[in-house]
Image: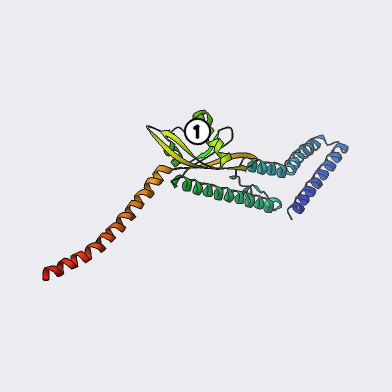
Amino acid sequence: MVFRNFRLNIIVRIVFLILAILGFVLFIVDSEPIRAVYIGILILLLLLEFFYYADKLNRDLNQFFISILHDDFTSVFKGRSRGRSFRELYGTLDDITLKFRLLRKEKEMRNQYLYSLIERIKVGIISFEPEGMVHMVNKAFIEMLDLPSLKNGRNLKDLDPDLFSILESGAAIEKQLIKRRVGDEEKEFSITSAGFKMEDRFYNLVSIQDIREELDKRELEAWQKLIRVLTHEIMNSVSPIASLTGSLHDL
């Protein structure tokens, strides 16, 4: 429908051009130069409008594709239609733009959700490229290893070559235990590594946990359970003695 109307508009403009040219020729033959000049100006205007109209679709489609190429989904085409011929096409372009805008919003919300989730877990997580460029690092990793200057986009290899060497070698081992001095204290960490490929680029994904903190927590829980068991056993032992003492007292 759109292109049928487009062809019809082109045909109408060609007919007007032909009529104007015929009129120009007739005025020249009849030796009426003034009218011929007016018709000549009209022909020039008709030609300019014809080329502008014929090229309008190309210009708008080119702008549409450039907008998509640069992730700019704010363009609106429907209001630009000066007639019914392009109204349906421009409406479709706006629908496509809206779809891209919704997809980008959904992607941003999903990324924000994952970012919030990673920031709130107690396990340290870092993802970096083989050259050392940090793609993602969470708050737990930074605090656990006391690396306040480590951020997304920084090069881990330049910032801490020893840590980079350990984490990079861990990618082949998958799981290992390491000792590292953090401040004035030497801590032991459990490191789990994995590699993955995304968009033709390879990344190392490493998670790290403080073993001593976990062991201290489990040891405390074990002691609490032991104390509860001992308390229960002591109470069970004391009860018969108390009963026997009461009986002897009665005698």
Q: Is residue 155 visible?
A: no
The front one of 20 and 207 is 207
Q: Position of residue 207 (x, y in %)?
A: 50, 43
How many marks the image carries: the answer is 1
Q: Position of residue 159 (x, y in %)?
A: 49, 29
Q: Tell me the amino acid under the disc marked 1.
A: Leu
Q: Is residue 197 left or right of residue 27?
A: left
Q: Position of residue 95 (x, y in %)?
A: 63, 52
Q: Report crowding for label 1: few under 14, some 14 to 19, many 20 or more residues within 10 A (C-alpha).
A: some
Q: Is residue 197 left or right of residue 47?
A: left
Q: Residue furthest top?
A: 158
In the rendered image, the quadrant that contains the N terminus is bottom right
Residue at 75% in and 52% down: 3
As displayed, is residue 43 above or below residue 234? Answer: above
To which quarter of the image does residue 28 belong? Answer: top right
Residue at 11% in and 68% down: 249
Residue at image mark 1? 163
Q: Is residue 42 left or right of residue 234?
A: right
Q: Position of residue 239 (x, y in %)?
A: 22, 65
